[in-house]
Amino acid sequence: MKMGVRMGVRMGMGMAMAMALWQEAAVVVVIVVRVAGAIGGVCEGGVVQALVALVMGGLVVEMGSENGGRLQRGRFRATQAPGVLLGAMTPPLVMASRLGQAVRSGAPGVEQVRVEFWGSIACSAVLLGVLMWSVVVGREGKERGVQRRNGCRLKKDEVGARRKRSGAAIVFLLLLVLVLLQLGLSISAGGVARCVVIAAGSAFVFQSFLQAFPSCTSAGEAMLVAHGFTLYLGNTVLDPLLKQFVNKVWPESMPVENVDPVHAIVHAIVLGMLLVPVLYRSLLSTLALEASEKPEKELILESASRAALFCFTVLAVVLWAAPAWLRLVAGISQHPVLWILQYMTDEPVQRWGLCVYWVVVIGIFSLVLHQMALKKQIARIMIRKGFHIMVLVMFVPALAFQADFLRISFALALGVFILVETIRVCRIPPLGEKIHTFLEAFTDSRDSGVLIISHFSLLLGCAIPVWLSSTTAEDRPLAAYAGILSLGIGDTMASVIGYNFGSMRLSKMSQKTWEGTIAGIASTFGASVLLSFMPPTFPLASQVGSMAIAATCAGLVEAFTSQLDNAFVPIVYYSLLSL
């Protein structure tokens, strides 16, 4: 009897996982069709074919993993669907939209954007290959080990499953070969070499991230992190260093480009703060200051040493590493702190006024939401959506009137978040435990691992569209608002309406409702229409259809994905608004 109940529960969970996977996959396919249809007549060189092949490869990996069941065990956070297809397609869709925008506007950096697109395709293909390897080869090895130990043969259903996985692996390899052949025919030899380096780096980052932070992300989220981090390092580290080297060796072969100081400052802040935890952990291991069981006096001395080491690491990055990097890649001899202070004085009323406004808003919202969190009667999801409203109130005026200042502010905020999370994870005294206790009041099941990722995803979901919009054509100004609209309005309205008034669930296993989804889509579209009248204005009639499709697709992603929607929805929405 108990065995039958267990089998029924497992079958029910398997069916629910399969349903969630195919619902999410269907939405991704619709978005790919939309992007491919919009750029198909503009972009040549196999761009659409590469997207189609990548979709097929992602579906093959998910089918080969038995609807994602094999990917739920071990290093990934348990979710209804692993999100492989969504994680594999999101960065290439963004790059495809940017490529179409660059070609449409005739921007001078079209070839660079084309190389970046193919780099994202290569990253996704390699990451899918890593997952396929873990599913097929890892499983086959376990089955052979069981055979050798037990001296028995596989059953018919096990043989069928093996053949299914092997067939999926063959199909995937053929698709991978086609994608790589198209890559080699579409860009120069130097571009191909760059794509190979980026793809190899993404696989390394993927494995390193899962080893350092197990069970913090789903498979799709880990792919997005590895993919985005590697592409970012390629643009901000690999390309500048390569240009500097070429200019030193062959001064006339590559003209010196003027670097936007705002971009340089943003990259210096982000790269510097990312360097802090890496450098701190390395020094900690070298000096053998890891926390351990020791007498109380030694622990106090060790805690003080760890705090001093962290302060030294931060000062070394701020006083030496960041300025040195700015001098190397942008020729800015002024210290970044002094540069920012001087930048603030250029328009003191607006920029210092925004700072005061932000401090007041953050103070009010933090106080109110923390008091609400202490009351057990208020649902935690409603408290979390308060931060989304705070995002809307803070960033819409700033993006409309001080976009460059907002880009720098996002970088500074991300740097602060990285420092705070490093202090919390490493329990650096005297604030480590206090920060951990404070942030626990705002966590949910997605923050069950080592990292608390919700606040990172909210900040990056708003910041990435703003950062990306500064490097593309100006004919799609609404794209910069993608994160603010989708999180501050769409996600908030979907949760509030769905939680309080929703009755028709999307599926039996989902807590989300059709009422909430429709409210989120309608509110996002309505807000985008209102924003069209803010500077810089644009002709609404020519883009209203595209805006409606973008809002609908973003709302469907939020409704049917079991991934971290704060990370995926803004990026997908940005790619659709950029068409």
Image (cartoon, rainbow, N blue to C red):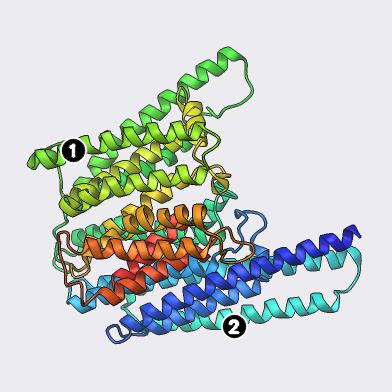
Q: Residue furthest left?
A: 346
Badge 1 or badge 2: first in the primary sequence: 2
Q: How crowded is mark 2: few (under 14 residues within 10 Å), some or many (20 or more)?
A: some
Circle 2 — which element? helix
Circle 1 — which element? loop
Q: Amino acid under label 1?
A: His
Residue 541: which numbered mark, if any? none
Residue 192 seen: yes
Residue 241 seen: no
Q: Where is residue 205 in the image (x, y as percent from the top left)?
A: 48, 56
Q: Mark 1 points at which residue?
A: 335
Q: Which residue is drawn at 62% across and 55% down?
A: 78
- Up the image or down, 263 lies above or below 177; here it is above
How many marks the image carries: the answer is 2
Left or right of 369? Residue 141 is: right
Q: Which of 146 and 481 is in front in this view?
A: 481
Q: Where is residue 128 in the image (x, y as percent from the top left)?
A: 54, 69
Q: Nearer the viewer, residue 325 or 168?
A: 168
Q: Amino acid under label 2?
A: Val
Q: Residue at x 80, y 68 (%)?
A: 144
Q: Mark 2 points at which residue?
A: 171
Foreground: disc 1 or disc 2: 2
Q: Which residue is drawn at 43% across and 67% down?
A: 90
Q: Nearer the viewer, residue 558 or 474?
A: 558
Circles 1 and 2, Cβ within 8 Å, touching? The answer is no
